[in-house]
Amino acid sequence: MPSASASRRSQEKPREIMDAAEDYAKERYGVYSMIQSQEKPDRVLVRVSDLTLHKADEVVWVRARVHTSRAKGKQCFLVLRQQQFNVQALVAVGDHASKQMVKFAANINKESIVDIEGVVRKVNQKIGSCTQQDVELHVQKIYVVSLAEPRLPLQLDDAVRPEVEGEEEGRATVNQDTRLDNRVIDLRTSTSQAVFRLQSGICHLFRETLINKGFVEIQTPKIISAASEGGANVFTVSYFKNNAYLAQSPQLYKQMCICADFEKVFCIGPVFRAEDSNTHRHLTEFVGLDIEMAFNYHYHEVVEEIADTLVQIFKGLQERFQTEIQTVNKQFPCEPFKFLEPTLRLEYCEALAMLREAGIEMGDEEDLSTPNEKLLGRLVKEKYDTDFYILDKYPLAVRPFYTMPDPRNPKQSNSYDMFMRGEEILSGAQRIHDVQLLTERALHHGIDLEKIKAYIDSFRFGAPPHAGGGIGLERVTMLFLGLHNVRQTSMFPRDPKRLTP
Amino acid sequence: MPSASASRRSQEKPREIMDAAEDYAKERYGVYSMIQSQEKPDRVLVRVSDLTLHKADEVVWVRARVHTSRAKGKQCFLVLRQQQFNVQALVAVGDHASKQMVKFAANINKESIVDIEGVVRKVNQKIGSCTQQDVELHVQKIYVVSLAEPRLPLQLDDAVRPEVEGEEEGRATVNQDTRLDNRVIDLRTSTSQAVFRLQSGICHLFRETLINKGFVEIQTPKIISAASEGGANVFTVSYFKNNAYLAQSPQLYKQMCICADFEKVFCIGPVFRAEDSNTHRHLTEFVGLDIEMAFNYHYHEVVEEIADTLVQIFKGLQERFQTEIQTVNKQFPCEPFKFLEPTLRLEYCEALAMLREAGIEMGDEEDLSTPNEKLLGRLVKEKYDTDFYILDKYPLAVRPFYTMPDPRNPKQSNSYDMFMRGEEILSGAQRIHDVQLLTERALHHGIDLEKIKAYIDSFRFGAPPHAGGGIGLERVTMLFLGLHNVRQTSMFPRDPKRLTP
């Protein structure tokens, strides 16, 4: 799209500018007609993040959004934004730009996308407000690729302002519902860009680690014929002339894959919970990172693999995503995430003792409440200096029917949770692989055997001992970054009150 | 689990054997009690695939399934199976085994899981029926880890028999419903093991390629508030006191991510279609591999990236999954998959000309029927010697409202399908990123603007030109391997008549 043809199609210039006959720069700016793949120009577009001193004095083309613009006499300063990066650009009356061109640039609505040709120039004083601090772009041509409407539903600068600045200095911040209602804009902030790039990294590291360990990725169905895990909190789907349900976890199918000899499997997919919970950490649809694995003799073989997988994720994030972590920290300051190798594993009874020492009254077979979970996280951090640990050997009474009892203590079980910054991110267990015991435990829990017949039948034709667990992706992202709400780490969150966008 | 303690727990030996006082091998066999993580022995279990001449004369422990057993006088031959691999094992009366032990081994139900200690011995004549042809295992100890019930719902040997053998020699094969009803057993066959390992490889190669190209993985919601793509063929979900729907594609959300500056995104996830289609290639729930990408000036930038991604998948499969391809070919013989670099791209009008030359009558703006698609595939294969090609520039009339019209021919569009062995595996297009044109096209298609308001609003605040497409995972696996039904490449398929297991 060479400039000549671009300006030929510039039919939307403001009338006042079109009328100005003396405009010597009129070929150098304008509004493109809609890009409909008319041409294949061989123009190279340079990334904003590549605009550094190495490119000083080069003429480059850049496509970016107009983040801000500020006219000042015969010049106009633009901040051009591209994902997490931005650079200052200057349109000044001179050989390349007329005063009409400066006015045109100054009038481009914020968030519009522009193509700019400019010279990269070293600046004498670092530009503190931009990520590209050592250079600015001296604009020679400017064309609007896509014009934004003039009134934005939220201001990006407000959306990245740390809450403390908002509170102490009385400056505007953006509340969560406004953000979520206008998610397309909110996701453009440097913070959101960093959060979701890092989340993509979590998925990548999860799979990379497991594939290196010999796991096979599986795809499990989300529409199921019966509410296999009890029946509460399940969404109903109209399925032709019948009803079906949305899977609350891939558990049954992971286990069937183990019975089908895949030995080590993982999957990443949506998990549905029809719970009317309106908390900072519950969603009705979230992304589960699920693992299931046959073991030889002891479920700790699996616990170690899962914990190591999480450690590889933490390490990978700290190695590969420092830019993103720092970007998020600017808005949400937070201590770096700490973990030990090997991962700290505490038994439930040890945790109880720590809590009781801190003055909490709890029965031996009582589950952890959310406040106690958090308190325990603080106690563990003080004592062991880790933000990540495993709690092993939960009371049998508080776990699902398919949980393998501890052979040495009938009130305990071979089950575990894992915690990040004092909040649960994974729940798992050795599963019962014996039909007789599974049936007994289901009856003990008052479960209708007919409804779980397919599940139980899976174990009739030889089943290896196995264990596994499910990780909540949004929680891992939230807690690794020290954020405070899973809605910050779900692109399009679903809760009892939100189904849009 | 040392053998001494193992046999201590062997409480389920058949009475006749327990009664035999003179059994000098009685410590060397039996049935383990259920593995409940009682112990952490440091026994190393060797993989069946590692049983080669390199291990000749070594004593090893192996855990595997009893695939077949055949008693013959004082000895019993077992075939031990582990995933795609199997090895012959021999229990013979002698120093290590008593006649009771041979009888015990011979009576273990097929598909039971056993722990065996044995010596790896070179064989004089290759064992043609096993993957490990050069060695067999001389059994010294044998314990049942998990006993299968005696009557299997299907025989694994029948389930891997080529159809032609079944037809010509009158030998048993297994029909599809029996397979799917007993999927846990059917998935144990060497063919299924290979199919789903290769499918895991497709997902891995897809992501590996895209992450190397700078794409970001996104997670899109499956529960949506309105049937955004028209309203037909959508499943309804009860969502607390309201209705919601299951997403028919991640299209809207992929496009929103582009409008939110992620530039290049992909996702892998379930896609739901409430179509009452009972064909070899339709499922009500399948796995979509989805791509969306902003481009600079021409949608062919995106077409090339998608085609290259598929080419990288084909290459990767042929490089890394030869064992799996050959395993599947044994049951389902098929020519190797052929493709060109760069990928062949034909325009729709060229395809029409080829079909017309072959005697087909078709209008310029008519869509391809399934038989014509297949015929075209054969014509393209004859002429260009490729199983993979792109069909570009579909008639605007047969594509969805959001498809960008071709600027040079208003009856054509900037849209494309991709084909493998004559069947469509991807559909894609440049999308309209301009609110005004999008609104016009929606009205032209008679779509209620109120229902797609959120979609249209996404483009109001600056939207880059973009294109993308969605790939059906099960179809890619099926067509790459030359299989004939997507139910063979979906672990737990869902169609109008099947919701279980």
Image (cartoon, coloured by chain):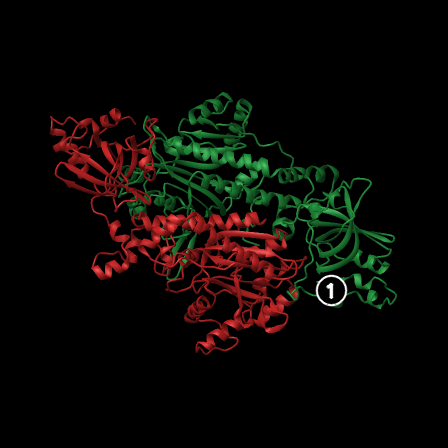
Chain colours: A green, B red
Task: Pinpoint residue A411: horizontal percent, then vertical percent.
Answer: 35, 28
Q: Secondary structure at mark 1?
A: helix
Q: Nearer the viewer, residue B358 or A492?
A: B358
> Residue extending furthest front?
B124
At which x and y percent is residue B173?
A: 25, 56
Q: Quadrant of the C terminus of chain A?
A: bottom right
* Residue B245 visible in the displayed image: no
Task: Please name the residue shown 30% across and 36% down the image.
Answer: B63
Residue B406 spot, x, y in % from top left: 61, 69
Label 1 packing within 10 angstroms: few (<14), some (14-19), many (20+): some
- Give the labeled residue for mark 1: A6
Q: Residue at x 13, y 32 (%)?
A: B99
For the residue pair A154 and B110, the one nearer the viewer reads as B110
Q: Is residue B436 left or right of residue B319?
A: right
Chain letter, disc 1 residue: A
Quadrant for the N terminus of chain A, please: bottom right
Q: Which quadrant of the structure image shows residue A239? A: bottom left
The amino acid beneath tag 1 is Ala
Quarter of the image for residue B435 reads: bottom right
Residue A93 visible in the snapshot: yes
Left or right of B233 on screen, residue A106: right
> Residue B284: x and y, percent?
41, 59
Q: In the depicted view, which residue is nearer to us: B438 or A88?
A: A88
Q: Total marks drawn?
A: 1
Picture residue at 45% right of the left edge, 35% below the top: A306
**A117 to A421, vertically: above or below:** below
Nearer to us in this view, A286 or B237: A286
